[in-house]
Image: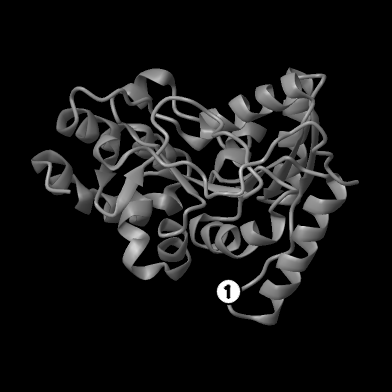
Amino acid sequence: MQMTTAGTTYDDLALAQPAAGDVMHFGEFAITETQSFPPPSRAQCWAYVTLNAEISLSLPHSPGLQSLLHSPRVRVSVDGQWLWWALRRKYPTRPLEKLSGSDLIHRIAAHCAQKGQRLLLLGSTPQANARAVQVLRQRWPALEVAGYAPPHYEIGEASEARMKASSLAAIRDFGAHYVVLGLGATKEHRFAWQAAPELDGVTHGLLCFGGAIDLASGVVRRAPIGWQRLGLEGIYRVLQQPARAARFVRVLRVLPALALGSF
């Protein structure tokens, strides 16, 4: 099933970027999305990254993220209370909403339900993916949503090429206007960088939302709002998933830079 574009005027130029003087930066990351969501659709498929401390620290070791970051396709919002506090302090007069993947998966579902557009959930386990699809359908009965959980693969191996081919086929066959990626940060950034050019004129955007599919499914519980506002969401995740403790400790390395505003 192909996505129809009748009546839509596409801009063949790259996605419009804010004027240089209006852009907030966290290191090399330009924060392009500060309030509205989703970004405007164009003929060029965009890739959306929700920036948190862990992703910022992974940049030197992630060629896929580096390539995506320097692409005109990339859209970046702030995901994480710590980063939001630091940027609000550094740019006190700029409007900035915390736009995290765990919230935006519901916003894109509502958007698609209202606009009659199709949403595909790509990633996580088959069980969590199917459950997330069910939850979104129950919440928005008008939503056209489907899921695909590709088999395990390794970056740079033949299994990655098979995964990319099967995932692109799923996207095109469903005619997905938006695709939520839940492959894990490194893999989904690499997939978005490689796949977006092949989806121009077919899909509006690839959304790198990390664990949002798991959270939407209820397999993983999100921290209560009070924990989120206090910047304790990471600790709450560790309490649920002790295996994440080492990752959380590594993320603490970003705190001095955030506290000093040296980013």
Q: How many marks?
A: 1
Q: Which residue occupies the foreground of this view, 29 or 257? A: 29
Q: Residues within 10 Å of mark 1 (few under 14, many from 20)?
A: few
Residue furthest out toward the left: 260
Residue ID for mark 1: 155
Quadrant of the image occupied by residue 88 = top left
Q: Kindly identify the residue that appears in the image at 29 percent across and 39 percent down.
A: 23
Residue 68 drawn above or below residue 125: below
Q: Kindly identify the residue that appears in the image at 70 percent across and 61 percent down.
A: 198
- Residue 38 in the image, given as x and y percentages of width and height: 56, 31
Q: How is the image coloured?
A: one colour
Residue 171 drawn above or below residue 222: below
Quadrant of the image occupied by residue 115 = top right
Q: Kindly identify the residue that appears in the image at 49 percent across and 61 percent down.
A: 186
Q: For the residue labelled by badge 1, is the local secondary structure a helix, a strand or a loop?
A: loop
Determine whether, in the image, residue 86 is placed left or right of residue 42. left
Q: Is residue 221 visible?
A: no
- Residue 78 in the image, given as x and y percentages of width and height: 37, 37
Q: Kindly identify the residue that appears in the image at 52 percent across and 50 percent down.
A: 14
Q: Which residue occupies the foreground of this view, 4 or 254? A: 4
- Residue 80 in the image, given as x and y percentages of width and height: 35, 36
Determine whether, in the image, residue 95 is placed left or right of residue 43. left
- Residue 244 in the image, given as x and y percentages of width and height: 42, 51
Q: Amino acid at mark 1?
A: Ile
Q: Which residue occupies the foreground of this view, 116 or 186? A: 116
